[in-house]
């Protein structure tokens, strides 16, 4: 068996083409569901999927014996998630697309995602929710994503531009529109019908793809669908586009 991590590897971190002719590619599509406490467990699974996909790119020892035995290379190229699963999916997509380490994601849930930090004070009058969203967790989450983006890739990792071209990643996040999206149409009997949809879909792709035709929705109040419960953070303002790629 050829050790393609050392023999025939190019200086940018990818194996030479003649050393990979007998390898199969295992392509994974990951779906991460929502769940407040489940997010901590899912973040560990997300981190291991990242390690699996980066074995050859970063010359990692974890999962290498298994992939060598199977003469395979693993890729995660489609990620979908909602609520806490969407947060973990966003970290995974960022790490894969930009060649970044996901330690900040692990630390986010371990140190900042506890109920002790998220719960509002019981002495607060008329709280909008039990958990603190925009005033605490949103800036904390933003800081963790920026920390991942700012962290340098490991020595010997391939160029991000090359990796983006050869290893495309698509991220799909779902949410719920607070005010909804109104659509009017006429049925076969000529009767006007108005429907209100509350679903929202956000798509991100690397390399970027041309956005599908769609109208840009007005500013709405939205929150991820599985957090529509009393113990969830309050709705957060956001601008959404149903099928636009970003």
Image (cartoon, grey):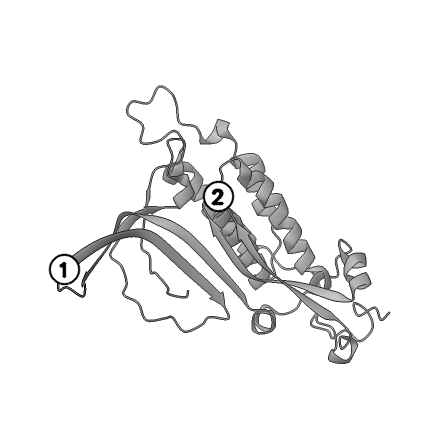
Q: Are marks 2 and 1 in contact (CB under 8 Å)?
A: no
Residue at the extreme front of the image, as rendered: 189
- Determine the CA span between mark 2 and mark 1: 37 Å
Drawn side of residue 83 relative to residue 156, left or right: left
Residue 58 - label: none
Q: Point out the image quarter for the C terminus.
A: bottom left
Residue at the extreme top of the image, as rendered: 123
- Position above or below: 96 against 4: above
Could you say where residue 232 lies in the image, as x and y percent from the top left? 40, 35
Numbered disc 1: secondary structure: strand
Residue at the extreme right of the image, as rendered: 1
Could you say where residue 140 lies in the image, as x and y percent from the top left? 47, 42
Could you say where residue 177 lies in the image, as x and y percent from the top left? 31, 49
> Between disc 2 and disc 1, whose residue precedes?
2
- Position above or below: 149 against 156: above
Residue 34 - label: 2
Q: For the point 37% across and 31% down, which residue is it?
A: 230
Q: Point out the image quarter for the N terminus.
A: bottom right
Drawn side of residue 92 relative to residue 126, left or right: right
Instruction: Provide the residue designation for mark 1.
Output: 192
Q: How many marks?
A: 2
Numbered disc 2: secondary structure: loop
Drawn side of residue 239 relative to residue 104, left or right: left
Packing grade of label 2 (10 A; few <14, some 14-19, many >=20) is many
- Position above or below: 142 against 57: above
Drawn side of residue 194 relative to residue 133, left or right: left
Number of the front mark, 2 or 1:
1
Q: For the point 83% across and 68% down, which residue is it?
A: 3
Packing grade of label 1 (10 A; few <14, some 14-19, many >=20) is few
Q: Quadrant of residue 157?
A: bottom right
Could you say where residue 87 lies in the image, as x and y percent from the top left? 49, 48
In the image, 46 versus 102, the foreground residue is 46
């Amino acid at each position: 068996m050829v050790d393609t991590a050392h023999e025939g590897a190019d200086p940018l971190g990818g194996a030479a083409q003649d050393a990979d002719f007998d390898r199969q590619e295992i392509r994974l599509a990951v779906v991460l569901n929502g769940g407040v406490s489940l997010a901590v467990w899912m973040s560990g699974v997300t981190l291991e999927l990242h390690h699996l996909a980066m074995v050859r790119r970063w010359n990692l020892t974890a999962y290498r014996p298994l992939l060598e035995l199977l003469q395979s290379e693993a890729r995660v190229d489609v990620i979908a998630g909602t609520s806490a699963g969407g947060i973990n999916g966003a970290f995974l997509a960022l790490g894969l697309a930009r060649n970044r380490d996901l330690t900040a994601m692990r630390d986010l849930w371990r140190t900042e995602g506890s109920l002790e930090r998220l719960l509002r004070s019981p002495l607060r009058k008329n709280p909008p929710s039990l958990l603190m969203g925009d005033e605490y967790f949103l800036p904390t989450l933003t800081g963790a994503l920026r920390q991942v983006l700012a962290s340098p890739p490991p020595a010997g990792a391939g160029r991000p531009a090359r990796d983006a071209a050869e290893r495309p990643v698509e991220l799909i996040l779902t949410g719920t529109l607070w005010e909804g999206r109104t659509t009017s149409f006429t049925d076969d009997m000529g009767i006007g019908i108005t429907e209100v949809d509350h679903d929202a879909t956000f798509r991100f792709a690397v390399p970027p793809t041309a956005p599908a035709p769609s109208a840009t929705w007005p500013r709405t109040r939205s929150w991820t669908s599985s957090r529509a419960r009393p113990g969830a953070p309050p709705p957060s303002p956001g601008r959404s586009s149903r099928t636009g790629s970003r």
